[in-house]
Every structure is written in structure tokens, then in C-alpha cells.
Image (cartoon, rainbow, N blue to C red):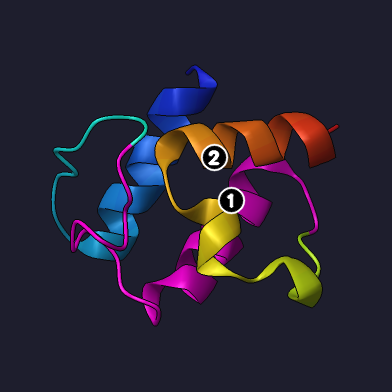
Amino acid sequence: MDKRKQILEIIRAVAGKEPTIAPDESLFDSGVLDSFGLQDLVTGLEKSFGVKIPDSDLTPRKFDSIERIEEYLEEHGK
């Protein structure tokens, strides 16, 4: 499974619905996720991609869109 599909699966699981947004659209502004879902999103990313995301990075800005999540994983992944 490619990275974007994995990210979408995690978002779907956290949001409880199919995310129907553009890759550069805000997950939070669009209502797909709220601030409470951020921790669940990060936990899912850590499990799926084998990364450790430090608490200092737990800001909606870093995980605001599918594209930003992909960029973060590229920078901090294995």
C-alpha cells in the first residue's frame, strides 16, 4: 500500500468517515478532524509508519493536510 493510501486509511479510522478533501485541503478547517482527533491521528501514523512523533510536534499545523503529513513523514521517517 502506498503512503497516501495508508494516511487516508488512518484518517478514515480516526474520523469515522470517508475523507473527501483535496490533498492540500485542511483536515481541521474542513471538519474531517478536530483537535481531539490529532492524538489519534498521530498514534495511527506512529504505528503504521514506525516513527516516533515527539510531543513538541503535536500541533495541528504540522498535520493539517494529507500533503503536510506526507512531507512530515518524508522528513522524519525511516
Horizontal side, residue 61 vs residue 76: left or right: left
Horizontal side, residue 56 vs residue 60: left or right: right
Residue 35 in the image, given as x and y percentages of width and height = 40, 78
- In the structure shown, which secondary structural element does the residue marked by tag 2 occupy? helix
Q: Residue at x 48, y 61 (%)?
A: 41
The range drawn in magenta is 25-52
The image quadrant where one finds the C terminus is top right
Query: Separation of disc 2 and disc 1 at Cα?
Result: 13 Å
- In the structure shown, which secondary structural element does the residue marked by tag 1 occupy? helix
Mark 2 in CB contact with mark 1 (< 8 angstroms): no
56 up-or-down from 46: above or below: below
Q: Residue at x 78, y 48 (%)?
A: 51
What is the three-letter code of the residue carrying label 1?
Leu
Horizontal side, residue 1 vs residue 51: left or right: left
- What residue sits right under mark 1 in the picture? 45
16 up-or-down from 6: above or below: below
The one of 37 and 22 positioned closer to us in this rendering? 22
| Among the two numbered marks 2 and 1 on one chain, the one whose residue lies closer to the N terminus | 1
* Residue 34 drawn in magenta: yes
Q: Residue 7 lies in what quarter of the image?
A: top left
Residue 56 in the image, given as x and y percentages of width and height = 79, 74
Q: Residue 23 lies in what quarter of the image?
A: top left
- What residue sits right under mark 2 in the picture? 68
Classify 10 Å Cα crowding around label 1: few (below 14), some (14-19), many (20 and above): many
Classify 10 Å Cα crowding around label 2: few (below 14), some (14-19), many (20 and above): some
The one of 30 and 16 positioned closer to us in this rendering? 30
Residue 30 in the image, given as x and y percentages of width and height = 19, 56
Q: Is residue 60 visible?
A: yes
The one of 78 and 30 positioned closer to us in this rendering? 30
Q: Residue at x 54, y 60 (%)?
A: 61
What is the three-letter code of the residue carrying label 2?
Arg
